Image (cartoon, rainbow, N blue to C red):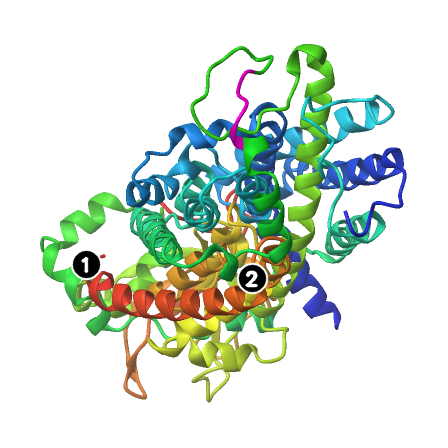
Amino acid sequence: MNSDAQQDFALAFLSILFEGAPFILLGTLISGFIDIYLPPGTMDRFLPKNRTLAVMVSGLLGAVFPVCECAVVPVIRRLVGKGLPVSCALTYMLAAPIVNPITALSTWKAFQGQAPWMMTGGRMLLGYLVAVGVGLVVARVPIRAILRKSLVDKMEKEPVVEKSSHDHSCGHDHDHAHDHSHHHDDEPDDSRLIAAMRSAQKDFVDVGVYFTIGVAITALFNTGIAPGTQWLDGLAGNTLVAPAALMALAFILSLCSTSDAFIAATLAKFTWGAKLAFLVLGPMLDVKLIFLYQTVLRKKFIVALSVSLFVVIWLASIAAQAWLVPTI
Amino acid sequence: MVGSDYMKPEIRRILFSLAVLLWAVCLLYFYGSGRIVKYLAPDFRPIALCGGMGLAVLGSFNLLTFRRVASCGHDHEEEHDHEGGDMNPFASLLLMVAPVGLSMAWTTDSFSQSTLARKGLYDDGPSAAENTFISSVLPPLTMEEIEKSHRKTSDGFLKFDLMELFFATGDREMQDLLSGLKIETEGRIVPEKVNNPNGTRMRLYRMFMTCCVADSRAIPITLEFGGEPPLLPENGWVNVAGTMSFPEENGIIRAVLVVERATAAEVPAEEKFLRR
């Protein structure tokens, strides 16, 4: 890298980092405190008994329990283990990183001057619809075809223990499966505060590492340093190929949903629909998520889910580009 | 947990705190030194300050309490961990610190000419076809309105933003009004690399930023000196005055200012055009 390339990279890198870092901090502070202070069974109480309605409500739970995609996988792993319907858990897993106030705020902020309400609304809506669609399909698939064998075996061994006794020391009544083995009365407040801050810091570092890598790659493309920049630019105006190219980029970059909008907003040459595809697919499917999903889901199901998400979001973004963009 | 389960939690906490504190120092330094104005649009600057302070609190808190035993209050009989990460903490620290440290050392707070070219420095202005919708919904513009909304210098030039002159290439009504008008404007001056057969031209530009400098783009016009251009610092700020014209060259309408005077100028407080 010559000195010109170094100064270009540094300027673009730092500017995107300065823009996104506060939003990552906000997201990880919230997830850290949720991690420590929110009992794992709390979410079950929000779900209706009707399966379709439960899936639809699950797609909105991110508005109440905002977590990014890195944090959500361990959460749903725990929730599925405790009896939350798989269809609801997967819907929440796919929707929560998108349909949540932090992501909405960061998307709106990042797209100032580029139809921010349209992009924020489009992202929330498409993310929600795709997640609910997956949930409704998954509700009709045998659980053994979805979850890892070890997880299913664990659930089959321990259902009675999980679903029977609700007479616990917290003193409140529950009429459904409820994981509730926390014992907050025993712990001093500052002990839990320290645990929450540590959890938030751990989340920040986990996300910060991927964000740094993503910002570095983006800065290289943004300033024309990276090989293939011209080739990528050449695809930017192509209505059909541009969304697929940015979806591939989102998959590789593995950005956090709380900050990926700041990257997408800098891809000035790409179509609105391509940026929408980037922002919807990224939180649902990327390199790191593929690894995280393997802690919960069967490999065959991950492949089917990945292909389905790619195709559906690609088609939806092309349709959005065709129908919505002329109205902006 | 894969990469960090062999490491003492205290060491991991210190490493993570250092990574967070470095980011905090970086954000707070750029804000405190005023250099943040070169990187972020105004409404993002206080957010960056809050982010820097928040990171400082988070990192300091965890560093000061790294030895304290803390419990989340959950049942730990099953697999359960709030602090372990996917990656070796040393690798995490390196990945978070190295690119930031290198960038702080490398940055000159500005783009090179090649990146400016990539960001539109030598692109044509908007065509009339692109602005048809805007022109059709705006009321007709008059010379009286232009004179009312632009200050006149003591030597009779109307002060214009470069942005107005740039976008006039896509607005025939503006072209008619501005053609032949005595105009003064300011921006950075660089050599003209397109359509300059006699070497009598330079280019004047200013960056337009919506959120951060990575999404900025150049807003340029052409300066015609009619002879050898004066020696002015390349990429330095200049104040130029002359007569505006919109000649069609190679089928493209260009904004060309025929310069009568050009002098080096002070760097403005806000160098970039900002979204309003």
Assign the magenta stretch its main secondary structure: loop
In the picture provided, is B273 more to the left or to the right than A290?
Answer: left
SS for tag 2?
Answer: loop
The residue lying at 54 percent from left, 39 percent from top is A79
The residue lying at 66 percent from left, 63 percent from top is A9
Q: Which mark is residue A276?
A: none
Image quarter (top left, top right, bottom left or bottom right) of the C terminus of chain B = top left
The residue lying at 46 percent from left, 31 percent from top is A43
Whole-percent x and y of residue A273?
Answer: 34, 65
Chain containing mark 1: A
Residue stretch in magenta: A163-167
Q: Nearer the viewer, residue B217 or B18?
A: B18
Circle 1 is placed at which residue position? Answer: A327
Circle 2 is placed at which residue position? Answer: A286
Whole-percent x and y of residue B53?
Answer: 65, 29
Visible in this render: residue B257?
A: no
The amino acid type of the residue labelled 2 equals: Asp
Q: Specify which label sits upstream in the sequence, 2 or 1.
A: 2
Is B51 situated above or below B139? above
Q: Does the magenta portion include A187? A: no
Badges 2 and 1, same chain: yes
